[in-house]
């Protein structure tokens, strides 16, 4: 059995995510974005916009400054990506659509226990089909537009946005409708046949076990090396479901079991995967970046304890609201709580903290990266609020920059 040191596992994980630090010297284009998506497997979507929308940040971490509109066009004009529940809400390569159909079918039974949907079904029989017909007739259409149309046509029912959104989300979950585009982050729904490329819709639907095997292979490629729990969580499979499928992949020679020294559980990797001798990364990693999704894995790989504190009351936060770890070389060496003050043209560093073993160049390297982020977001300068033990050193480094 192949054996990896913790450092090798760390470098392999960073490399698999495309975070090696070798950013293109050219202006990034769709080819570069495709490379990012091939590495990450999907891009998580989240509504928090304190810095910029979550799905734009992984590409920046890997490519440096790029045109966010490229990603929008890749998804909603060129139809290379589609929106569905992958890890969480996500943009996925359209080639994965057949692998998600088993999930769409499974949702039909599971959503019967959704209280809000049950209320709509009980109080408004036929309403979900009426909403579906709205999409057929008018798509692409938003939840707000459906609700307004229903109010005009059926005032006695007292239709409201919540019911419209509930019906649309149910139809989205089960795959009868999909996202055609987003405007100001609001989702506009349409029929899959008007959005998903015909060649993808015509592709055969694999059975559930086969779909799980392929999703686990994507996870393995994006992890570099991972345990059963690591690989399962990437597409929100349960370890119980994933374990026999991984065993089948090992038996077929598509995965190999490896040992990572210090890990208490077996790990798996693509056979023959090459471990980089070094990685020269310098990147701020967003809270919803695939590298840091699984907090226990982050701690196991990097010795870095990381939690999202968005939903923690302000008085109980340790590091801040929207905290990005800073990857330097093959280590997470610091973290900063960032906010884009768009009206003032300032990237605010609301707190800054360094790890105990952060190298001496951490402040200067982080200052350079913060300046790059600010320019990418169209902000004129970076300002450190002074909170956090690393704030003075970072302020000084920014002044020198």
Image (cartoon, helix red, strand yellow):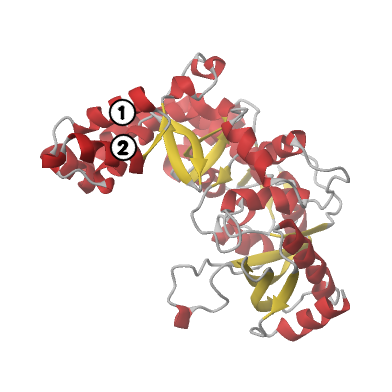
254 or 292: nearer the viewer:
292
Percent coordinates x, y for residue 286 in the rendering? 63, 59
Asked whether residue 270 is in view, the answer is no
In the image, what residue occupies the spot 73% across and 61% down?
A: 373
| Residue at image mark 1 | 134
Residue 171 placement: quadrant: top left
* Left or right: residue 222 compared with residue 99: right
SS category of the residue bearing label 1: helix
* Left or right: residue 279 compared with residue 141: right
Asked whether residue 320 is in view, the answer is yes
| Residue at image mark 2 | 146
Percent coordinates x, y for residue 22 in the rendering? 85, 49
| Disc nearer the start of the sequence (1/2) | 1
Percent coordinates x, y for residue 260 in the rendering? 68, 53
- Point out the image quarter for the N terminus: top right
Q: Is residue 370 above or below residue 36?
A: below
- State the separation of the CA atoms marked 1 and 2: 7 Å
In the image, what residue occupies the spot 78% across and 69% down?
A: 366
Q: Are marks 1 and 2 in contact (CB under 8 Å)?
A: yes
Q: Residues within 10 Å of mark 2 (few under 14, many from 20)?
A: many
In the image, what residue occupies the spot 22% across and 42% down?
A: 117
Q: Is residue 268 above or below residue 350?
A: above
- Point out the image quarter for the C terminus: bottom right
131 or 238: nearer the viewer:
131
Total numbered labels:
2
Percent coordinates x, y for residue 308 in the rendering? 52, 66
124 or 157: nearer the viewer:
157
Q: Residues within 10 Å of mark 1 (few under 14, many from 20)?
A: some
SS category of the residue bearing label 2: helix
In the image, what residue occupies the spot 63% across and 69% down?
A: 338
């Amino acid at each position: 059995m192949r054996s990896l040191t913790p450092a090798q596992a760390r470098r392999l994980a960073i490399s698999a995510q495309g975070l090696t630090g070798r950013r293109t010297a050219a202006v990034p284009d769709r080819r570069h974005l495709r490379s990012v998506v091939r590495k990450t497997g999907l891009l998580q979507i989240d509504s928090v916009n304190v810095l910029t929308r979550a799905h734009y940040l992984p590409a920046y971490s890997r490519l440096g400054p790029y045109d966010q509109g490229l990603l929008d066009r890749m998804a909603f004009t060129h139809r290379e990506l589609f929106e569905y529940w992958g890890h969480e809400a996500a943009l996925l390569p359209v080639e994965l659509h057949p692998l998600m159909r088993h999930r769409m079918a499974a949702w039909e039974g599971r959503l019967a226990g959704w209280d809000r949907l049950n209320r709509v079904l009980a109080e408004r029989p036929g309403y979900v089909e009426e909403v579906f017909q709205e999409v057929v007739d008018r798509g692409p259409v938003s939840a707000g537009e459906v609700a307004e149309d229903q109010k005009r046509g059926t005032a006695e029912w007292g239709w409201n946005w919540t019911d419209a959104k509930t019906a649309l989300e149910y139809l989205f979950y089960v795959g009868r409708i999909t996202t055609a585009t987003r405007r100001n982050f609001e989702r506009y729904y349409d029929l899959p046949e008007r959005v998903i490329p015909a060649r993808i819709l015509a592709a055969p639907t694999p059975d559930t076990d086969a779909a799980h095997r392929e999703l686990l292979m994507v996870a393995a490629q994006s992890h570099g090396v991972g345990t059963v729990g690591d690989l399962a969580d990437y597409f929100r499979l349960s370890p119980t479901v994933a374990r026999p499928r991984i065993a089948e992949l090992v038996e077929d020679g598509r995965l190999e079991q490896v040992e990572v020294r210090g890990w208490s559980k077996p790990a798996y990797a693509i056979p023959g995967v090459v471990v980089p001798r070094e990685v020269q990364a310098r990147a701020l990693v967003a809270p919803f970046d695939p590298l840091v999704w699984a907090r226990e894995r982050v701690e196991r790989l990097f010795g870095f304890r990381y939690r999202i504190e968005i939903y923690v009351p302000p008085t109980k936060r340790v590091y801040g609201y929207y905290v990005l770890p800073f990857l330097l070389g093959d280590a997470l060496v610091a973290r900063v709580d960032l906010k884009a003050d768009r009206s003032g043209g300032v990237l605010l560093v609301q707190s800054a903290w360094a790890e105990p073993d952060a190298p001496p160049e951490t402040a200067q390297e982080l200052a350079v990266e913060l300046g790059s982020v600010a320019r990418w977001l169209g902000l004129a300068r970076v300002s450190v609020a002074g909170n956090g033990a690393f704030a003075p050193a970072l302020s000084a480094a920014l002044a020198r920059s």
